[in-house]
Every structure is written in structure tokens, then in C-alpha cells.
């Protein structure tokens, strides 16, 4: 299947980010009439069904990589509302994405809440905190290697480039999560969003602040992210936007925020040992402090949010899924570093 490169992220003061899509699929995603839409859905559906089955059921890595690129493309168009009413293209995209997600969801392990039979909100939240803090993300070999030895320039560029793809979208995840979160729980989401946008200082907005990581190394002309990085963004999109379940969304991002400060400390230490000057690393220093408070806040919200075991399980399910997706992104970076000996 012939592939085509599409520049998908290229707005404001940014680094262009491109993804790779099968040309035949990409060329059949748009339609001007209802009849054309029906025909293209009929043509593409079995292709996507087979590709998704290979990716998630057969665990074919090439198919999985292709699906993550395609899913990211569909998610980005939707979450940024690109050309949603000009033609029938969104109809095709929504149907194809549903086919992909139906296959993926079958393969996600079910979360087990140990305190289900002796439930209380306090015991459930404490169990979730314990499971977040014991997840493999906290002991990932990439972070251990970074903090102990630093990384080469090429490895640092791999790391920050792939991290950047997710960082650029994080504030949008917070906003979209608020769309279906009850009013009484939107305040902390608003506070988090305000922090992400630099607390009123546009120059300190986190997507812009992150770019300082490239000041000494030099910005690449283009980023072609690993599929593992796109997978993390796709998992976040589902939790924050597609699930439509605020328990699932709050749990997922609560787990991420809770575990972030310790990861940030290791990353900061690793980049310092890699030779990056302190002035380039402001993003990580700020987040060690900010995310420490965010993590506490998100879990305080969950304490008020979960009233039943079923609600707690939704939080737990998403939390473990997003931590695993983040660990998978680190897996991808670590694999390249080891395989290329960089």
C-alpha cells in the first residue's frame, strides 16, 4: 500500500508535524454529495476493518503504526473542528474512526477495583493513587537511563520532538473534557487550562514554552512522530473527547497529573546531564511544581466525584490506560535509542 506524507500540525509559532497515511485511504476520505459519501464508506469500511483487525487483534506492528497515524489524523480534524460543515467528509471520518475504536476497545484489559466489595470513596481513591504510583511508568528504563547518564543530541531530539506532539494538544484535551463534565467539576479544569495558557501571559503558554527545549539544539524543519507518540495522543483524545464520560476523562488525566512530577524530575536531570542549558529547560522546572498541585487537585476532585464502585472503575480503567499509553511512548523512544545505539 503506497503511503503519503501529510502536514497536519503547522499553526502559530510551531514546528511542522507530519504523519504518514495510506494514499488510497487518504484520497477517499472526502465527498461532496451523499451518494459519493455512501460509495466511499462502502469502499473504505472493509479496508479499515481489516487494517484494525491486524493492528489490534493480530498485533501486527506495521498495521498498528498505520492505524495510529490514521486515527491521529481523524482525531485532530475533529477536535480542532477542521472543515466540519463544508461537505460530507466528517461523516466518512466519523464512521471509519468508529470501526477502528470498536476493534481497539475489544483489546483493552478490564480494570479491577480491589475494594469493590468493601467500597468507600476514600478507599477507592487511595487504591487508585497506589496503582498510579506503582505503575511501570514510574520506573521506566528510559527515564532511569536519562537521569543517570544523559542522552546524545540525536536521542534528545527524538525525545523532545515526540513529546512535543502531545504537549501541543494538551490544553485542547482539558477544554474538550469540560464539554461533558458537570458544571460543578469544571472549575479545576478551567484552572488547569489557565495554567496551560501561561496564566494570562501568552509567551508562557505551555506549547510555546516547550519550544525553548530546541533553543540550543536547533529546531528540526519537520517532525515525523513515532506511532507510539501518536498512540498517546489518541488515547488522550478518547478520554478527553470521544468517551463522553467525565468519570473516564477525569480518571485518565488525574492519573497522568499525579505521576508527572517524578517523571519530570528525571527528565530534567537527564537533559541537564545531556548538556542542555538551564534556560532551555524552563518547561520542565515549571511542571515539576505545577503538576504536583494539579495531581493533588485532580484526585481531590475524584474523591468528590466517585460515589459508586462502577464510577471508580471507570476512573481506574482510564487512568491505567493513559499511563500505559505514556509508557508506550517511552518504549518507542527507548527502542530507537537502543537499536540505533545513539
Image (spheres, rainbow, N blue to C red):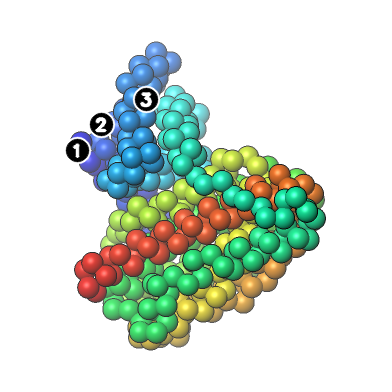
Between 7 and 184, the one nearer to me in the picture:
184
**Rendered location of residue 83, percent (x, y):** 46, 35
Secondary structure under badge 2?
A: helix
Q: Name the mark on residue 2.
A: 1
Between 94 and 191, the one nearer to me in the picture:
94
Q: Residues within 10 Å of mark 1 (few under 14, many from 20)?
A: few
CA–CA distance in space, label 2 to label 1: 7 Å
User: Disc 3 designates what residue?
Assistant: 45
**Rendered location of residue 236, percent (x, y):** 52, 51
CA–CA distance in space, label 3 to label 2: 13 Å
- Does the CB distance between marks 2 and 1 fall below 8 Å? yes
User: Disc 2 designates what residue?
Assistant: 24
Residue 204 position (above or below residue 282): above
Residue sitting farthest toward the left = 2
Secondary structure under badge 1?
A: loop
**Rendered location of residue 201, percent (x, y):** 60, 69
Residue sitting farthest toward the front = 117
CA–CA distance in space, label 1 to label 3: 18 Å
Sequence-earlier tag: 1 or 3: 1
Sequence-earlier tag: 3 or 2: 2
Between 114 and 146, the one nearer to me in the picture:
114
Q: Could you tell me which quadrant the C terminus lies in? A: bottom left
Question: Residue 87 is drawn in which quadrant?
Answer: top left
Nearer to us: label 1 or label 3: 3
The residue lying at 44 percent from left, 24 percent from top is: 88
The residue lying at 65 percent from left, 47 percent from top is: 314
**Rendered location of residue 211, percent (x, y):** 43, 69
Question: Residue 148 is drawn in which quadrant?
Answer: bottom left
Secondary structure under badge 3?
A: helix
Amino acid at each position: 500500500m503506497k503511503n503519503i506524507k501529510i502536514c497536519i500540525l503547522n499553526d502559530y509559532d510551531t514546528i511542522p508535524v507530519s504523519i504518514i497515511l495510506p494514499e488510497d485511504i487518504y484520497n477517499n476520505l472526502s465527498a461532496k454529495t451523499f451518494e459519493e459519501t455512501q460509495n466511499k464508506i462502502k469502499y473504505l469500511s472493509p479496508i479499515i476493518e481489516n487494517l484494525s483487525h491486524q493492528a489490534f487483534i493480530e498485533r501486527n506492528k506495521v498495521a498498528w503504526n498505520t492505524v495510529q497515524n490514521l486515527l491521529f489524523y481523524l482525531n485532530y480534524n475533529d477536535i480542532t473542528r477542521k472543515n466540519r460543515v463544508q461537505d460530507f467528509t466528517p461523516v466518512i471520518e466519523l464512521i471509519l474512526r468508529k470501526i477502528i475504536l470498536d476493534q481497539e476497545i475489544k483489546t483493552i484489559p478490564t480494570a479491577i477495583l480491589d475494594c469493590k466489595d468493601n467500597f468507600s470513596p476514600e478507599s477507592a481513591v487511595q487504591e487508585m493513587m497506589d496503582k498510579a504510583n506503582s505503575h511501570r511508568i514510574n520506573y521506566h528504563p528510559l527515564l532511569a537511563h536519562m537521569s543517570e547518564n544523559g542522552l546524545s543530541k540525536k536521542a534528545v531530539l527524538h525525545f523532545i520532538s515526540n513529546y512535543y506532539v502531545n504537549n501541543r494538544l494538551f490544553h485542547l484535551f482539558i477544554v474538550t473534557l469540560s464539554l461533558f463534565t458537570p458544571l460543578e467539576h469544571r472549575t479545576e479544569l478551567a484552572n488547569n487550562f489557565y495554567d496551560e495558557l501561561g496564566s494570562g501571559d501568552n509567551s508562557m503558554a505551555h506549547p510555546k514554552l516547550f519550544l525553548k527545549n530546541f533553543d540550543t539544539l536547533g529546531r528540526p524543519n519537520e517532525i515525523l512522530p513515532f506511532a507510539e507518540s501518536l498512540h498517546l495522543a489518541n488515547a488522550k483524545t478518547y478520554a478527553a473527547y470521544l468517551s463522553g464520560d467525565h468519570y473516564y476523562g477525569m480518571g485518565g488525566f488525574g492519573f497522568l497529573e499525579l505521576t508527572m512530577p517524578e517523571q519530570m524530575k528525571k527528565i530534567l536531570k537527564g537533559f541537564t546531564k545531556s548538556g542542555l542549558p538551564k534556560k532551555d529547560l524552563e518547561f520542565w522546572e515549571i511542571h515539576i511544581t505545577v503538576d504536583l498541585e494539579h495531581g493533588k487537585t485532580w484526585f481531590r476532585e475524584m474523591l468528590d466525584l466517585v460515589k459508586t464502585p462502577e464510577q471508580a472503575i471507570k476512573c481506574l480503567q482510564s487512568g491505567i490506560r493513559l499511563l500505559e499509553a505514556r509508557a508506550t511512548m517511552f518504549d518507542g523512544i527507548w527502542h530507537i535509542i537502543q537499536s540505533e545505539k545513539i
